[in-house]
C-alpha cells in the first residue's frame, strides 16, 4: 500500500498537574468541563468554501460495468463506499475556477481502499493523486472494483437528489450517462461490536494471533465487554464527548477481568488494550480512513490534568494510537 502523506501541526499542550481526584474515583461531577486539544495531530483548519459533498459518507447502490454497458447493483456483502473530508481548501491549480475547492476523498471498492484529493465544484468532481491498496479478491468483487475505480480516473459530474433517502448520482461528463448511484452511509457509533486489528501506531500497527479474536463491545445501557486475547473483561462507561470537539471521549469505571496468564506476546498485547480502556479519559476516533473497512475505531493516548482552581479538566490528545478496531 502506498503511504498517504499526512500533515502534522503543533498545538499547545494542556497544563501539567495531577489528575482530579473525582476522576480517579470514577465519579465525574456534572459541572466539570472537558477541553480536547491535540499536541501532534490536527486536521487542517476548515475553509469557508463548501460543497454539497463536504463531510458526507456514501455507499454504492449501482455501478456502471463498462464491458457489459449497464448499471448493476453493488455487492451487498462487499460494500463500495465513499467518504469525503469535512474540511476543504482552495484549489491551487493555475486555471482553477474560484468555486472549485480541494477535498480529500476516501473510498473502499469492496476489496481495496482508495483515496486521493478531489477538485470539487457544486457539480463536478475529479480526483488526482489517487492511491490504492493491492489486495486480490474473488472475480465478482474485482469486477465491481473496476467499475468503482472509474470515479477516481476521470472527470465526472454529480448531483444529490433530495429524495428519502438521498441519492448521490455520478455521470460521465462527456456522455451524461449515469455511472454510479450512492445512498448515505450510516454514521458509525461507539455502540457497536469491534474486533482488534492491531496495537500501536496507525502505519505500524501490529497484532498477535490469539485463540479467538480480540473483541470490544459498547452497549446502549452504559456497559462494555470484550475478550483481550487471554482474559474476558467488562465494565461501565460514559461517553463524555463535547459537541464541536475534534476528538470524541469516553471514560470507564468498574473494569473487571479474569486472571488467566498466557504467552508473553499475548499478555503484552492484552495489557496495551486494557491500558487504552483504563485511561482516566480515553479519546477515540471513528471511521479513520486508514482502515480497510468503511468504519473503524481508534483508541488514542490521552492525559488529564486540572487547572490551578481544580475546576476544569483538560484532555490532551497526544495523537498516539493505542489500539485500532474494525467492525465485527
Image: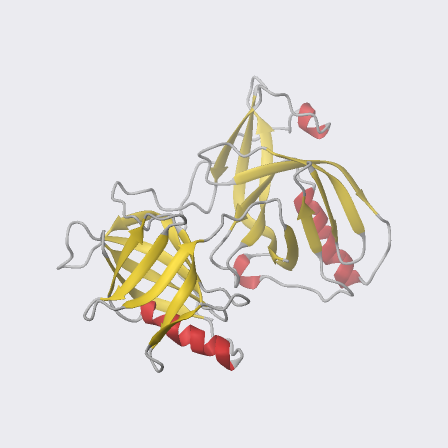
The location of residue 62, given as percent across then percent down, is 40, 66
Between 224 and 307, the one nearer to me in the picture? 224
In the image, taking residue 302 as reference, residue 219 lies left or right, namely right
In the displayed structure image, the side of residue 85 where residue 177 appears, left or right: left
Residue 228 versus residue 305 in the image, above or below: below
Question: What is the image's colouring?
Answer: secondary structure
Q: Position of residue 94 (x, y in %)?
A: 14, 59
Task: Give the residue furthest to the left.
Answer: 95
* Residue 147 spot, x, y in % from top left: 38, 73
Residue that appears at 61% across and 21% down: 30
Residue at 26%, 70% (x, y): give it.
154
Q: Residue furthest front?
A: 164
Residue 83, x across and y down, in percent: 41, 55
The residue drawn where x is 35% and y is 48% is 163
- Asked whether the viewer can see residue 6, the reply is no
Relative horizontal placement of residue 217, taking residue 320 as reference (left or right): right
Is residue 231 rendered to the left or right of residue 35?
A: right
- Quarter of the image for residue 219 reads top right
68 in relation to 115, above or below: below
Q: Quick one: quadrant of the C terminus?
A: bottom right
- Can residue 244 be spotted in the picture? yes
- Residue 68 found in image quarter: bottom left
Tally the marks: 0
> Residue at the right extreme?
260
> Is residue 260 depicted above or below 235 in this figure?
below
Amino acid at each position: 500500500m502506498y503511504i498517504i502523506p499526512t500533515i502534522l501541526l503543533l498545538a499547545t499542550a494542556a497544563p501539567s498537574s495531577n489528575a482530579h481526584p473525582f476522576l480517579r474515583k470514577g465519579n465525574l461531577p456534572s459541572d466539570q468541563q472537558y477541553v480536547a486539544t491535540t499536541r501532534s495531530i490536527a486536521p487542517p483548519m476548515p475553509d469557508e468554501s463548501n460543497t454539497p459533498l463536504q463531510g458526507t459518507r456514501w455507499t454504492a447502490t449501482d455501478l456502471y460495468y463498462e464491458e457489459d454497458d449497464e448499471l448493476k447493483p453493488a455487492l451487498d456483502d462487499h460494500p463500495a463506499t465513499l467518504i469525503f473530508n469535512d474540511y476543504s481548501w482552495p484549489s491551487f491549480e493555475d486555471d482553477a475556477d474560484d468555486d472549485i475547492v480541494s477535498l480529500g476523498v476516501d473510498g473502499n471498492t469492496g476489496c481495496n481502499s482508495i483515496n486521493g484529493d478531489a477538485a470539487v465544484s457544486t457539480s463536478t468532481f475529479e480526483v488526482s493523486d489517487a492511491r490504492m491498496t493491492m489486495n486480490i479478491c474473488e472475480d465478482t468483487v474485482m469486477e465491481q472494483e473496476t467499475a468503482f475505480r472509474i470515479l477516481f480516473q476521470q472527470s465526472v459530474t454529480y448531483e444529490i437528489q433530495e429524495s428519502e433517502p438521498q441519492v448521490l448520482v455520478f455521470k460521465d461528463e462527456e456522455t451524461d450517462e449515469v455511472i454510479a448511484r450512492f445512498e448515505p452511509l450510516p454514521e458509525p457509533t461507539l455502540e457497536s461490536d469491534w474486533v482488534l486489528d492491531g496495537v500501536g501506531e496507525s502505519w505500524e500497527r501490529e497484532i498477535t494471533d490469539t485463540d479467538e479474536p480480540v473483541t470490544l463491545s459498547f452497549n446502549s445501557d452504559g456497559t462494555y465487554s470484550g475478550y483481550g486475547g487471554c482474559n474476558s473483561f467488562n465494565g461501565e462507561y460514559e461517553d463524555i464527548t463535547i459537541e464541536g470537539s475534534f476528538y470524541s471521549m469516553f471514560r470507564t469505571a468498574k473494569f473487571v477481568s479474569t486472571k488467566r496468564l498466557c504467552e508473553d506476546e499475548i499478555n503484552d498485547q492484552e495489557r496495551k488494550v486494557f491500558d487504552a480502556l483504563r485511561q482516566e479519559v480515553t479519546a477515540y476516533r471513528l471511521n479513520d480512513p486508514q482502515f480497510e473497512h468503511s468504519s473503524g475505531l481508534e483508541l488514542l493516548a490521552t492525559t488529564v490534568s486540572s487547572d490551578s482552581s481544580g475546576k476544569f479538566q483538560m484532555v490532551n490528545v497526544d495523537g498516539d494510537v493505542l489500539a485500532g478496531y474494525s467492525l465485527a
